[in-house]
Image: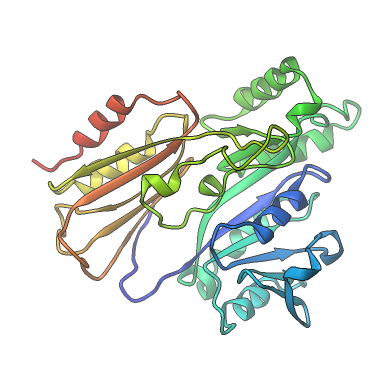
Amino acid sequence: MDTVDAATVAPIPLTILTGFLGAGKTTLLNRLLTGDHGLKVAVLVNDFGAINIDAELVVGVTGDVISLANGCICCSLRDDLVEVVLEMMARPERPEYVILEASGVADPAGITMAFHTPRLRDRIRLDSVTCVIDAEQVFAYPDQPALMDLQLRQIAFADMVILNKVDLVGPEQVRRIRDLIDDHFNNIRLVETRYCDVAYEILLGVGRFDPAKLAVSTEAHDHHDARAIFDTWSYETDRPLSLAALQAAARKLPGGVFRCKGIVQVAEEPERPAVLQVVCRRVEVTRLAGWAGRPSTRIVTISAPGSVAGEALRQRFEACVAS
């Protein structure tokens, strides 16, 4: 894990979206493009035709870019991925978040490495790699082991797995899929859903630290479109934390924690805030130039319902307080 100086640069967070053909990636992208998350999201897609954007939302089409009324843009990918990203970042309306849809048959290794080039390293922050799985099709090709190998490789590069279409299978199939993932990998977070109805709060790791804003409500949804309710928990202290202890604690968060984020006062350099970002297994700490108000620490977690004990989390972060 790297500690990055963010005093003069604010890299745009990027999520790479992977998953086999037909898993539901496009459904998820449509939700992000038309959602009320309040973010200027840039979505990079392989096929414009698959995106079903309401014509009333379209405010402009320029070349390979569709601009939407909610501030989001949709951009068609070309061969030179790095050039597309740099052009998108140079637009007058600079996006706050980037979602890149990988091809359904793509190995995510090459795409992931593309964002570690010198040209992008300080401009793009790889926030997460999310893999969408079709619960009905995971074991549909027993005579084609290469397809299973590809699906496992896509999962291997993921921080989080979205198990989609669980309404089409029974609990025994879901258990088989979970066992498959557990047999091959350690500590990969899995979210069960249908129609890729996943809360923005666990997909988009932008620094919103108010638990009231992080709470996910089902009040506005009927039983056909109900979002899962996620637990939120927060920790606050005026005492500086040890940076090394904080990094170690973040790497060992319980498996039920999907995201953890916070503004932290660290003992090693208390005059500069540290920004903590944890997306499943990915941990990053960046540094800001100075405090806007009184120095203090506030950390928020988002977790699966009932999966994490708040007292255990409190003790974990209390142990990071510098002596």
Report the residue at 35% width, 24% height from top.
Answer: 309
Q: Position of residue 176 (x, y in %)?
A: 71, 19
Can residue 278 be seen?
Answer: no
Please provide percent x and percent y for residue 172.
Answer: 73, 15
Q: Which of the pair 90/157 is nearer the observer?
A: 90
Q: Report the residue that reaches farthest toward the left.
A: 323
Location of the C terminus (image quadrant): top left
Q: What residue is at 60 percent from the left and 59 percent from the top? A: 113
Residue 317 can be seen in this image: yes
Q: Is residue 308 left or right of residue 90?
A: left
Q: Quadrant of residue 188?
A: top right
In the displayed structure image, the side of residue 37 where residue 145 appears, left or right = right
Above or below 82: residue 273: above
Q: Position of residue 12 (x, y in %)?
A: 50, 67
Q: How is the image coloured?
A: rainbow
**Residue lying at 78% horizontally and 55% vertically, measured from the top left:** 103
Q: Residue at x 22, y 43 (%)?
A: 236
Depth order, front residue of 53/240? 53
The image quarter containing residue 83 is bottom right
| Along the line of sight, the residue nearer the viewer: 47 or 143 | 47
User: How many discs mark residues in the rendered view?
Assistant: 0
Whether residue 96 sits left or right of residue 265 in the image: it is: right
Measured as percent of width and height from the top left, residue 193 is found at: 67, 34
Kindly give the residue lying farthest to the top in the view shown: 172
